Amino acid sequence: MPTYTLNTPLTDADIEKLRAGDVVLLNGIIYSGRDAAHKKLMELLDAGKPLPFDLKGASIYYVGPSPAPPGRPIGSAGPTTSYRMDAYAPRLHALGLKATIGKGKRSDEVKQAMRDNKAVYFGATGGAGALLSKCITASTVIAFEELGPEAVREMKVKDFPLLVINDAFGGELYAKPKLDD
């Protein structure tokens, strides 16, 4: 499988070269957000208010990190199960979101939104939150501080290891094999 080093914000050209099963080392700024934060993002959009970050080319990591230990920008930062954000993802992809990061399968609606909007779904290794946190060099809460670990954070990542689970062309790492009749 090919390995790509990509920098955020992601572009259509970045997304077009990726296929399910490819490895990506991601660098730059990503944002955290779980279901409570996504609900608040939808409320902002419904009210015609700006989001706390620009969705164009953005990547959202489904994570609720633990508190940062002394000398570190963040605590353990393992991925959350992604289907909990499936009700929100298509709208965000339509507004320019290029990548989501989590674990588990995505709904058919999310996979269609990725195809329609040239976006991808990256898998991060579940159970490896302490190791993944070492790739996060800075973390700042930028919205919804009242949500604690589920607040939206702007995080700077360096060589954040990811696997393309769903690509923009309908490729899927979890796809069921087709059996001959």
Image: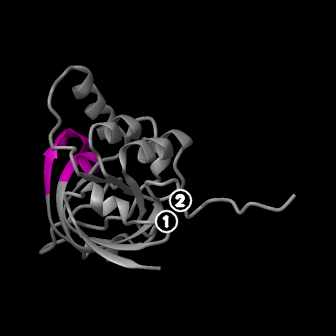
Residue 116 shown left or right of residue 59 in the figure: right
Residue situated in front as seen by the camera: 149 or 161? 161
Q: Which residues are magenta?
A: 140-153
Dot 2 crowding, Cα within 10 Å, few <14, some 14–19, many 20+:
some
Dot 1 crowding, Cα within 10 Å, few <14, some 14–19, many 20+:
many
Residue situated in front as seen by the camera: 142 or 12? 12
Which amino acid type is marked by label 2? Answer: Gly
> For residue 80, which quarter of the picture?
bottom left
Residue situated in front as seen by the camera: 96 or 28? 96
Q: Position of residue 86 (x, y in %)?
A: 46, 41
Which amino acid type is marked by label 1? Answer: Ala
Rendered position, 57 above or below 79: above
Q: Which mark is residue 74?
A: none
Q: Is residue 170 magenta?
A: no
**What residue is drawn where x is 54% and y is 54%?**
105
Query: Badges 1 and 2: C-beta atoms under 8 Å apart?
Result: yes
Rendered position, 51 above or below 104: above
> For residue 3, which quarter of the picture?
bottom left
Is tag 1's residue or tag 2's residue first in the polypeptide sequence? 1
Q: Position of residue 90 (x, y in %)?
A: 40, 38
Q: Position of residue 20 (x, y in %)?
A: 49, 65
Outermost residue on the right side: it is 181
Cα gap from disc 1 to disc 2, whole angstroms: 5 Å
Q: What SS does tag 2 mark?
A: loop
Residue bearing mark 2: 171
**What residue is drawn where x is 27% and y is 43%?**
96
| Quarter of the C terminus within the rendering | bottom right
Residue bearing mark 1: 20
Q: What SS does tag 1 mark?
A: loop
**What residue is drawn where x is 42% and y is 79%?**
2
Q: Position of residue 127 (x, y in %)?
A: 45, 70
**What residue is drawn where x is 27% and y is 22%?**
46
